[in-house]
Image (cartoon, rainbow, N blue to C red):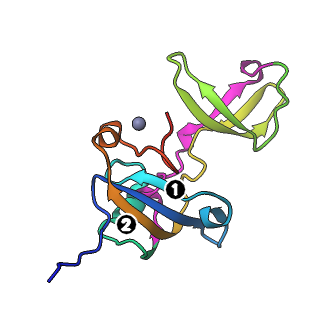
């Protein structure tokens, strides 16, 4: 008799999935099924937030996984110290600043941090460098489409290649 065993999500597997992410109060953030290609990622490499990665471990192709992830297992708590006051003249003079605008801050070492304009004042601007989903409770609904062995190169890079994955 053949030993039938479902392929399940484990470290070193390349996983392809559709997912829906909503916040408390049912605010929909992402629904790949509705508007995008499925996503692929390398399991066990920290490609996903920890709470979601943990919930997917051991799950099989075809399964639908629903999980609620708290901020500490998601994008972290909202850090008030990451909300900063920046002088107006630090921004390009021809840039029309608007509240809610997403910008990229570059420090002296060339590190890039995404940030969002929160408040506009005459001489300064309040920007928030927290992840946009910091402090949020994340409601995921995931449908696992494919589980395969990742290649040695993918495991070395810490991400999957090809359709829905990393493109070099
Ligand atoms: Zn790569």
Which element type, helix, strand or loop, lies under badge 1?
strand
Q: Earlier in the sequence, mark 2 or mark 1?
A: 1
Specify the quadrant of the image occupied by residue 38: bottom right
Seen from the viewer's position, the closer of residues 54 and 149 is 149
Residue drawn at 43 percent across, 75 percent down:
62
Is residue 142 positioned above or below 115 on the image?
below
Confirm or deny contact between disc 2 and disc 1 (CB under 8 A). no
Q: At which x and y percent is residue 123?
A: 80, 24
**Residue at the disc numbered 1:** 39
The magenta stretch is 67-92
Ligand 1, seen in the image, is in the quarter at top left
Q: Is residue 30 left or right of residue 88?
A: left
Within the magenta stretch, is there residue 52?
A: no
Is residue 74 positioned above or below 86 on the image?
below
The CA span between labels 2 and 1 is 14 Å
Q: Is residue 97 left or right of residue 79?
A: right
Q: Is residue 139 left or right of residue 121?
A: left
Seen from the viewer's position, the closer of residues 101 and 63 is 63
Number of residues whose C-alpha sits closer than 10 Å to that of mark 2, classed few (under 14), some (14–19) or many (20 or more): many
Which element type, helix, strand or loop, lies under badge 2?
helix
Q: At which x and y percent is residue 163?
A: 51, 49
Is residue 165 positioned above or below 91 on the image?
below
- Choose mark 2 or mark 1, whichever is in front: 1
Residue drawn at 48 percent across, 45 percent down:
162
Q: At which x and y percent is residue 119?
A: 76, 40
Within the magenta stretch, is there residue 81?
A: yes
Number of residues whose C-alpha sits closer than 10 Å to that of mark 1, classed few (under 14), some (14–19) or many (20 or more): some
**Residue at the disc numbered 2:** 56
Whether residue 19 is visible to the viewer of this picture, yes or no, is yes
Whether residue 51 is visible to the viewer of this picture, yes or no, is no
Residue drawn at 46 percent across, 64 percent down:
70
């Amino acid at each position: 008799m053949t030993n039938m065993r479902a392929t399940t999500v484990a470290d070193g597997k390349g996983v392809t999935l559709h997912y829906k992410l909503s916040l408390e109060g049912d605010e929909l953030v992402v629904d790949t099924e509705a508007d995008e290609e499925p996503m692929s990622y390398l399991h066990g490499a920290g490609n996903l937030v920890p709470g979601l990665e943990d919930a997917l471990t051991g799950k099989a192709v075809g399964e639908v996984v629903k999980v609620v992830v708290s901020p500490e297992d998601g994008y972290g708590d909202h850090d008030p110290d990451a909300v900063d006051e920046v002088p107006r003249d630090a921004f390009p003079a021809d840039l029309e600043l608007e509240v809610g605008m997403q910008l990229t801050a570059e420090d002296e070492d060339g590190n890039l941090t995404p940030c969002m304009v929160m408040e506009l004042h005459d001489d300064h601007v309040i920007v928030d460098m927290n992840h946009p989903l910091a402090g949020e409770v994340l409601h995921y609904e995931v449908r696992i489409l494919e589980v395969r062995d990742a290649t040695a190169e993918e495991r070395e890079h810490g991400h999957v290649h090809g359709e829905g994955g990393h493109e070099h």
